[in-house]
Image: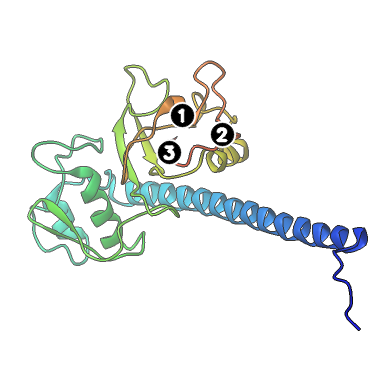
Amino acid sequence: MTREPRGFTLIELAIVLVVIGLLLGGVLKGQELIESARARSIISQIDSLKAAYYAFQDKYRAAPGDYPGSLAYANLTGIASAQVGGNGDGVVRDTEQARETLLLWVHLSHANLITGNYRAEGSLPERNGEWPRNPYNAYLQIQYDNHFANAGASPRLNLKTGNQIPAKVLAEIDRKIDDGRADSGQFRFSNFNGGGSAPSAQNCYDTKTGLWRAADNEPNCGAASLF
């Protein structure tokens, strides 16, 4: 005797929809947890690098990267040449003589204040192993400049997080450590390009309200943490 084919009952369809809903909810919640973990990682990275900078400054009475080569050669373990240093003017910034933003990582690592394997030939640092990167694989930078929101003509020493960070993650970081706005306080938007393309201010935050565009969640944003 041939049985008539039958479709799903309403109860079976309801169960399937509930299971799909639970799976989608789990995926979204998992993504949220990953973003929060990366936000915490970036905060930890900012805190540890600032602490390393201040520790170097306190110990050697100079800024890493700007530290003159003769002193670096005399006082830092493993520095190969008296040329591996900055101009000693008191601030970290690139000049025709030396790329102090890269020498900074060499000096911090050879002072045993950060982990990583860094070296320099003459006055030009070279990558040898891990270079400081954020959780999204973009380069970080510490420099005295005005490449951050509402800087005007007033440069300040700042640590750039690197780009490729979603706006939603930066908004969470800003709420946790500052005022929640991309154009004010100690944590602001920066268009520093640490890899790929430079972030756009208009895509990353509302230039009228100063709030991060967390809902739009532009994937390529960056920030600067002011010293």
Q: Is residue 202 above or below residue 108?
A: above
Q: Where is residue 85 shown, x and y percent of the image?
A: 15, 49
What residue is shown with label 1? 203
Give me the residue at 18% from left, 38% from top. Answer: 94
Q: Where is residue 116 shown, x and y percent of the image?
A: 32, 64
Of discs 1 and 3, which sits in the foreground? 1
CA–CA distance between discs 2 and 3? 15 Å
Could you tell me the amino acid type at mark 1?
A: Asn
Could you tell me the amino acid type at mark 3?
A: Gly
Q: Is residue 141 left or right of residue 30?
A: left
- Mark 3 nearby-residue class (10 Å; few <14, some 14–19, many ≥20): many
Residue 22, quarter of the rendered image: bottom right
What residue is shown with label 2? 216
Could you tell me the amino acid type at mark 2?
A: Asp
Q: Is residue 32 visible?
A: yes
Q: Earlier in the sequence, mark 1 or mark 3?
A: 1
Q: Where is residue 93 shown, x and y percent of the image?
A: 22, 36
Q: Nearer the viewer, residue 6 or 213?
A: 6
Q: Is residue 21 left or right of residue 216?
A: right
